[in-house]
Amino acid sequence: ASLTKMMTLYLAFNAIERGQVRLDSKFLVSSHAASQPPSRLGLKPGQRIELRYLIRAAAVKSANDAATVIGEGLAGSESKFAAQMTQMARALGMNNTQFRNANGLTTPGHYSTARDMTTLGRRLFYDFPQYYSIFSRRSADAGIATVSSTNKRFLDSYEGADGIKTGYTQQAGYNLVSSASRNGRRLVGVVMGSRSAAVRNGLMVE
């Protein structure tokens, strides 16, 4: 599900650091991206929007349209971006993951494991500490709207929690990759396939 967006954002951060794009680079919204189902930022075909706002919408609100625009803007098409996502997964040691899109909507051949998602969560924190704080934001200015965090309840209920990403589809159930730090020690946890957000958050607290 939307745990996928962790890799979309990882590649976005990587592209910024390599100088391929900047936070203020404007990305064109395609009709394909604009037609993605909710959760959505509400982008319109032909619109141009800064990458910083797309990152905030994808990370905080888990907006499917924003994630698709990021993928298309970085690679030229979503299929090319998905191939880059899978290639990066292998480079990070995520050997049981395959991506087919940038947002995590159910597609044949799109899958991962809890272990691989733990690896990705750690690498987001350690490879891009300068951007990691986005995952603890309760809300963010996404240019055309202020968006609220899909992970607010867990962030507010668990001391030291500072991220990372929720995910839900009917097929995948309720998923969460969380990171929390106490007394200088950080743990990353993954819960997949829960029947509700409350059950998911309770398991993560345990």
Image (tube, helix red, strand yellow):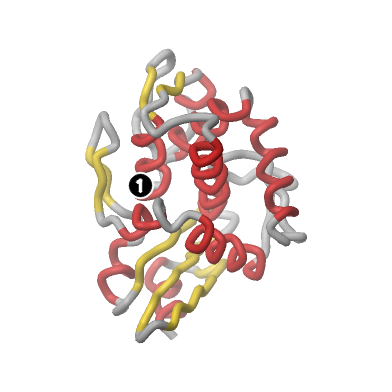
Q: In this view, does 195 lie above or below 135?
A: below
Residue at (49% x, 66% y) in the render = 177
Residue 39: x %, y % from top left: 40, 42
Residue at (28% x, 75% y) in the render = 157
Residue 103: x %, y % from top left: 54, 42
Side of 73 where 136 appears, left or right: left
The number of numbered badges drawn on the structure is 1
Looking at the image, the residue that sits furthest to the top is 46
Side of 60 where 80 appears, left or right: right
Q: Is residue 36 above or below residue 172?
A: above
Question: Which quadrant: the C terminus?
Answer: bottom left
Residue 143: x %, y % from top left: 27, 31
Q: Quadrant of residue 83?
A: top right
169 or 77, which is in the foreground?
77
Q: Quadrant of residue 140?
A: top left
186 or 153, which is in the foreground?
186
Element type where label 1 sits in the image: helix
Residue 29: x %, y % from top left: 45, 21
Q: In this view, does 10 lie above or below 79?
A: below
Query: In the rendered structure, which amino acid carries the disc numbered 1?
Result: Lys
Residue at the spot of label 1: 61
Residue at (33% x, 70% y) in the render = 154
The crowding category of the residue bearing disc 1, from other C-alpha atoms within 10 Å (few below 14, some 14 to 19, many at least 20), is many
Residue at (48% x, 65% y) in the render = 176
180 or 165, which is in the foreground?
180
